[in-house]
Image (tube, rainbow, N blue to C red):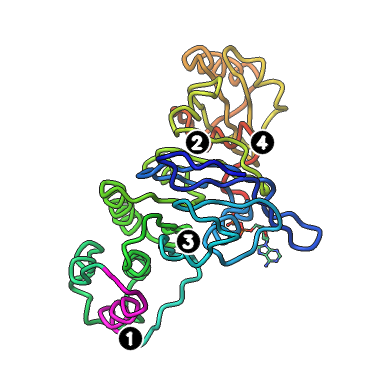
Amino acid sequence: MVNLTQESMVQVQGLVKRYGNFTAVNGVEFSVQKGEVFGLLGPNGAGKTTTIEMLVGLRKPDEGTALLAGYDIKKDINKVKEVIGVQLQSTSLFELLKVEEILHLYASFYPNHINIEQLVSDMLLTEKRKDRVKGLSGGQKQRLAIALALIHDPKVVFLDEPTTGLDPQARRTLWDIVLRLKERGKTVILSTHYMDEAHVLCDRIGIMDRGELIALDTPSNLVKQLQSSSTIEFHVTNPPEKESFLELDGVKEVGIRDKLVQLYTDELQKSLTALIHYTSLHNVTIEELQTRSATLEDVFIHMTGRSLRES
Ligand code: ADP
């Protein structure tokens, strides 16, 4: 039995989803406090959408359950649907309706709804309110999908990969909108495969890989757990064996993908000096050398040996 603590808005326990012999979600557990933005971060196919779909009642878990605002998704799914708002990747909007029309239509589904004019303004759609959905940009469509998710003033908002396919400016606009939801005390669960997005938006992050939650913490704690604080990246035509880099001063881990080499170090200056020495001694030409602080991407590579961008 799941215990609901006072501020806990979402409690997920042991969720499992199988498709035939394939386990898409394998024992996922986490809880989200009221007012928190919680991120599920992982590459394509990690099981993020399936997890969200189970939480919002679109798929039945094979095992486990979850409580949303105290309601059990297995026993009280209709109650759950009253307290959640959902923007899914596959949201298909009525292309021929105007922005305002579709909002009024959705509002009519609920006994109570928030002020539509204010909602349109919050989602930066005031100028587009009389336009047909089909003429909206990708970012505007996503903002409309979020408006529809918010119309009944839900306690918990689910955003599934809200910025996938958007240009950088549209992504940032959406980030501002999510941060404003947080300011207003909404509890938000979002999935993303962009580590920068997870870092900027989320109070805590669950890193998912192959159906499992492999880490869960605040973005800064996840990065702090890495032994190495910096990454040295460069291209080299014929990368030598991994072991030769591991021998360099300060280098804790090495990632090599095609011509890209990534060295993880906690002693940046020493490692750089050793690298330059090594390359001149062995006649290795390196290009596009850059250094940066460790990121969530590095956490993922550290834990799985793969990049978030590989599917
Ligand atoms: P993510 O959202 O992290 O990209 P998904 O939850 O969409 O991951 O998918 C997790 C895994 O489950 C993937 O390997 C996907 O191919 C598989 N999957 C998703 N839906 C189905 C389905 N209806 N039938 C079979 N396999 C599925």
Residue 113: % across, % down: 28, 70
Q: CA distance from mark 1 to mark 2?
A: 40 Å
Q: Residues within 10 Å of mark 2 (few under 14, many from 20)?
A: many
Disc nearest the viewer among 1 and 4: 1
Whichever of callouts 1 and 2 sits on the residue coming sooner in the sequence is: 1
The amino acid at mark 2 is Leu
Q: Do the residues bearing badges 2 and 4 touch, measured as CB atoms within 8 Å?
A: no
* Residue segment shown in magenta: 98-113
Seen at 33% across and 52% down, the residue is: 178
Q: CA distance from mark 2 to mark 4?
A: 13 Å
- Position of residue 291 in the picture relative to residue 248 (left or right): left
Q: Do the residues bearing badges 1 and 2 touch, measured as CB atoms within 8 Å?
A: no
Instruction: Name which quarter of the figure residue 158 lies in.
Output: bottom left
Q: CA distance from mark 4 to mark 3?
A: 38 Å
- Position of residue 26 in the picture relative to residue 33 (left or right): right
The amino acid at mark 3 is Val
Disc ID at residue 80: 3
Asked whether the viewer can see residue 201, the reply is no
Q: Is 149 situated above or below 278?
A: below
Residue furthest bottom in the image: 96
Name the element at disc 2: helix
Disc nearest the viewer among 3 and 2: 3
